[in-house]
Image: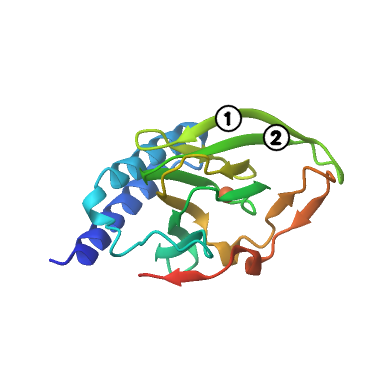
């Protein structure tokens, strides 16, 4: 069996386990169980070779590859392959929950709450480093910002309840002006379909 076929089988198994964990609804404890299923997938490093997910060149900085999605747009799983220096400003995921786990490399996640104000109202609550063995989970409406501070490239998995095209109400926060911006899919750049 090819690596891609093995990866697809492992992904299907992981997604079905995560769906079972959400049978009672998307709760903090259920999301914690789901997070560990995604971390278990990441531990199978041989399924995510650099030959399939290369380190991007200096111009690209990051590459995003879709590797699984339900036909209705749900349960979208992406590989994020980045060089050091990748950043994203604070954002939510349009009402979707989110999980980010590491196959290799590390990045800093800052987590926020927002009081609903048109301007300002964003407050950081914690900061953690996503790396092998340590993942991050966001409930629907959860806000995070990402910064790849390490000198090593990273390869992380991002799983969402809704794929990027379905995250139509996503918000992004400008910390200099305090303004809230609506999500534009084009701002994410090219997403490869690697299914
Ligand atoms: Fe995000």
Q: For mark 2, what is the residue?
A: 113
Q: Secondary structure at mark 1?
A: strand
Residue at image position (80%, 41%) is 116
Could you tell me if residue 177 is visible in this image? yes
Dot 1 alpha-carbon crowd within 10 angstroms: few under 14, some 14 to 19, many 20 or more: some
Where in the figure is residue 4, as x and y percent of width and height? Answer: 24, 65
Decide: is 180 above or below 182.
above
* The one of 62 and 111 positioned closer to us in this rendering: 62
Which residue shows up at 16% across the image and 67% down it? Answer: 2
- Considering every residue shown, the one lying at the far top of the view is 126
User: Hey, which quadrant is residue 119 in on the image?
Assistant: top right
Looking at the picture, tell me which residue is in the foreground, 99 or 33: 99
Q: The N terminus is located in which quarter?
A: bottom left
Residue 50 lies, in percent from the top left, at: 30, 59
Circle 2: element type: strand
Q: Label 1 belongs to which residue?
A: 127
In depth, the one of 55 and 28 nearer the eye is: 55
For marks 2 and 1, the one nearer the N-term is: 2
Question: Of residues 179 and 74, which is closer to you in this image?
Answer: 179
Q: Position of residue 191 (x, y in %)?
A: 50, 68
Residue 115 at what x, y percent from top left?
79, 36
Query: What is the CA distance from the residue labelled 2 to the residue labelled 1?
Result: 12 Å
């Amino acid at each position: 069996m090819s690596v891609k076929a093995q990866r697809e089988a492992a992904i299907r198994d992981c997604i079905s386990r995560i769906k079972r964990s959400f049978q009672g609804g998307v709760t903090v404890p259920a999301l914690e169980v789901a997070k560990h299923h995604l971390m278990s997938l990441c531990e199978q490093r041989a399924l995510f070779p650099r030959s399939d997910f290369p380190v991007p060149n200096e111009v690209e900085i990051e590459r995003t590859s879709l590797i699984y999605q339900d036909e209705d747009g749900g349960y979208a799983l992406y590989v994020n392959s980045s060089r050091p220096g990748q950043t994203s400003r604070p954002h939510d995921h349009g009402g979707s929950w989110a999980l980010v786990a590491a196959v290799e490399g590390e990045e800093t996640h800052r987590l926020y709450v927002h009081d609903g104000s048109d301007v300002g109202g964003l407050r950081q609550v914690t900061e953690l480093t996503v790396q092998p063995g340590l993942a991050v989970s966001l409930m629907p409406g959860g806000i995070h910002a990402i910064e790849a501070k390490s000198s090593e490239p990273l390869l992380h998995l991002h799983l969402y309840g809704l794929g990027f095209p379905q995250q139509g109400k996503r918000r992004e926060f400008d910390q200099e002006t305090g303004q809230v911006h609506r999500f534009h899919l084009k701002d994410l750049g090219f997403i490869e379909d690697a299914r």
